[in-house]
Image: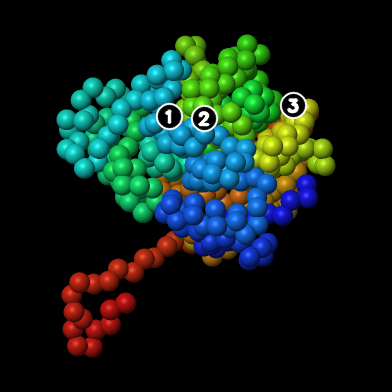
Amino acid sequence: MGFEVLVASRGEFSLISELHDGLHIDLDDFDSSLASILREAQRAPFSGILGSDDSTVELAANAAARLGLPHNPPEAARLSRRKDLARAQLTLAGCPVPAHWLIDLDRPMQKQMSGLRWPCVIKPLHLSASRGVIRTDTPAEFVSACQRIKKIISDSGGDEFERTHLLVEDYIDGVEVAYEGFLHNGELTTLAVFDKPDPLRGPYFEETIYVTPSQLHEATQARIKHRVARACTAYGLSTGPVHAELRVNQQDAWLLEVASRTIGGDCARTLDQGADFNLEELTISLATGQPITAVPPEDARGVMMIPIKQAGILRRVEGINAAGKVANIEKVDIIIRDGNELIPLPEGNQYPGYIFARGNTPSDVVRALRDAHARLNFVVAPVFRLERSSQRPACGDITP
């Protein structure tokens, strides 16, 4: 596309040095990060700024606004990344969202539980990829889950409010779907509606398969788009990518999330059309004010986010070649290297890899993904953690 790319990140385990000198910023310090980006723009003017995930969309919107570049209002970007603020705004706009409450972890829990309905789902305000999200069916489970999530969010960034409060909402039974689209001049265009054939009932919500085109009725898909468009209007979003999650049942298409970013992880590859179209180019074009014509896929596409079945240290992955030879499989991509730790949900937030498939029908794609996954074997060793003793060792003792 002819653009030089400057990557701004924390610099931890990043590939910046391989791509460019880069810009190291502290994402936990909003003001200093914004100041660093603005200083860099004075040195070499930018054509556009975009955030690649939930933690950066608000910063990107603020920087773009200050520089007069295409952007969503910073307040709208903030709504799209903060679950409690989003729920409140969507409720005011009359959008279908689960009934919800805010829990203060620093206050006694018993009184705050009054009026909750079971089952319910507890969520951190600012995390993504289902990290820290737990379904609870009883008061005892609720208290235990809050304590567990408190540990997760204690060192996960965010501000003081985000580290001391949780969103609680009714559990909505139904079929879950993902919506992928983009906004240009406030108009929403659909790229894909993904079915999720594996039920997501909890207690943790580890996603596995996305497949498109959706098998839902056209009228239902139209309702899904209408709900997402209404949410974008309620937020004040007008440009850029849109990713949404909804639960569909006989009552409605319920909004669970509407984010001003693309689909997470490497799943965006599912929509690639070779030289004709990819989601990354579309996003860059929108951020620089140069929209391109989107080309939604004509065949069936799917991706499996490989679930973590066992916690521990990854020793090796067996069966990759066999999985890749399954009919309709495009690629098996293991992104976690041997020697790294596999951490399941709700504490973890990263999948060990992805399987991509294309076929004539969605059922062909789902079958291929399941077959390929069945041929993989993750060899995992247990994690042994050493804890320091509070007692002095006796003469001749050795304490690790």
Q: In the drawing, what numbered circle is on residue 218? A: none
- The amino acid beneath tag 1 is Ala
Few, some or many residues within 10 Å of mark 1 (<14, 14–19, 20+): many
Q: Nearer the viewer, mark 2 or mark 3?
A: 2
Residue 134 quadrant: top left
- The picture places residue 81, in percent across and down from the top left corner, at 46, 37
Residue 278 quadrant: top right
User: Helix, strand, or loop for circle 2?
Assistant: strand
- The amino acid beneath tag 3 is Thr
The residue at the point 23 percent across, 72 percent down is 389
- The picture places residue 38, in percent across and down from the top left corner, at 54, 53
Few, some or many residues within 10 Å of mark 2 (<14, 14–19, 20+): many
- The picture places residue 39, in percent across and down from the top left corner, at 55, 57
Quickly name the residue at label 2.
258
Quickly name the residue at label 1.
86
- The amino acid beneath tag 2 is Val
Q: Nearer the viewer, residue 244 or 203?
A: 244
Dot 1 and dot 2 residues touching (CB under 8 Å): yes
The residue at the point 53 percent across, 19 percent down is 230
The residue at the point 44 percent across, 18 percent down is 93
Quickly name the residue at label 3.
361
- Upstream in sequence: badge 1 or badge 2: 1
- Residue 112, above or below 7: above
